[in-house]
Amino acid sequence: MTHVHSRLIWLDLLRAMAILAMVVFHFTFDLMYFGYIKAGTVFQPEWRMFERSIAISFLFLAGLSWQHTHRAGIKWRTVWRRVALLGTAAVGISIVTYFTFGPYMICFGILHLILAMSLLSLPLLSLHWAVPLACAAALGSYFIWADGPVQGSVWWMWIIWTSETTGSVDYRPIMPWGFAFFAGMAAHALFTRLNAFTYYGPSWGWARPFAFAGRHSLPIYLIHQPILFAGFNIYGFFVV
C-alpha cells in the first residue's frame, strides 16, 4: 500500500526502537549515577556494545532519511530548518551538561555529529551510492588502524578522538562515527531497489504509539534525561 504524502511508518518504528533503547541505557546510567547499582556498570563491555549499537542505529537511520529526503534534489529549506533545530538542540545539550557533568560535558555528541554530517554530506546526495559507501569505509577504517586516541590538539576533537580530548559522557567525532551516517546514505539505493519506500508501513493499532515516538525522537531525546534526573531526585528526597 503506497501513501505518497504520508510518513514511512516502518522508518518511524525503527527510530522508535532506537530511542527506546537509548532510554533504557540512560535509565541504567542514572541508576549507576545515583548509586542504586554497582559503579561502572554501564562501562562493562556488554553495555558499551549496547550503547554503541544505539548510536550506530541512530546515525544510520539519519543518513538513510537524509538521502531519501533529498533524493530528487537538495531541499534547502529543509537543510536550514535542520541546521537551526539541531544547532539549537546541540548547543543546549552542551550548556546543560556543562552545569551537570562539568569537565565531562558533551562537547561533540550525537546531535552535533548528525548536524555536521548533514552539512558535509550535501555534495554527495546526488552522487552514486558507491561514493558515500567509500566515505563510510574511509571513516570506519579508524577501527582498524587506531587502537585509541591519536596525538593531536583538543581543537581537532570534532574530527577525530585525540589524546587531549576529555572523557565526555557522549562523544562522537566524525572519525569513526560518521561512517554510520554515510552507510545509511549508501543503503538508500538498496532500500529503493527493494521497493521499501513504496511501502507505507504496518497498519496495526499497537504500532501507532511506537511510530509516534519515532516521529518525535528528537524531543524525546532532549527531555527524557531531565525527566529521569528529576524522578531520581524526587525519589531520593522523599523515599531514601
Image: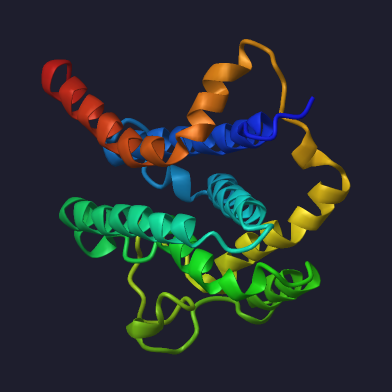
Q: Name above or below for residue 162 compared with residue 189.
A: below
The quarter of the picture where the N terminus appears is top right
Q: Nearer the viewer, residue 176 or 30?
A: 176
Q: Locate residue 87, reporting x and y percent.
A: 33, 60
Q: Name above or below for residue 59 compared with residue 208.
A: below
Tell me what residue is drawn at x 28 percent, y 61 percent: 104
Q: Name above or below for residue 177 compared with residue 25.
A: below
Q: Residue furthest top?
A: 205
Would residue 42 be visible to someone looking at this image?
A: yes
Tell me what residue is drawn at x 30 percent, y 41 percent: 33
Quarter residue 227 falls in: top left
Q: Taking 26 as reference, is 117 left or right?
A: right
Q: Taking 114 as reference, is 70 left or right?
A: right
Q: Locate residue 128, reporting x and y percent.
A: 79, 71
Q: Locate residue 77, reporting x and y percent.
A: 45, 57
Q: Nearer the viewer, residue 18 or 150?
A: 18
Would residue 143 be visible to someone looking at this image?
A: no
Q: What kind of colouring is applied to the model shown?
A: rainbow
Quarter residue 4 falls in: top right
Q: Locate residue 101, reporting x and y percent.
A: 22, 54
Q: Taking 191 as reference, is 81 left or right?
A: left
Q: Nearer the viewer, residue 192 or 158?
A: 192
Tell me what residue is drawn at x 61 percent, y 12 percent: 206
Quarter residue 31 falls in: top left
Tell me what residue is drawn at x 70 percent, y 29 percent: 3
Q: Name above or below for residue 185 compared with residue 142.
A: above
Q: Residue furthest left?
A: 237
Q: Nearer the viewer, residue 174 or 233?
A: 174
Q: Taking 159 as reference, is 198 left or right?
A: right
The quarter of the picture where the C terminus appears is top left
Q: Looking at the image, how many numbered discs can be counted on the residues?
A: 0
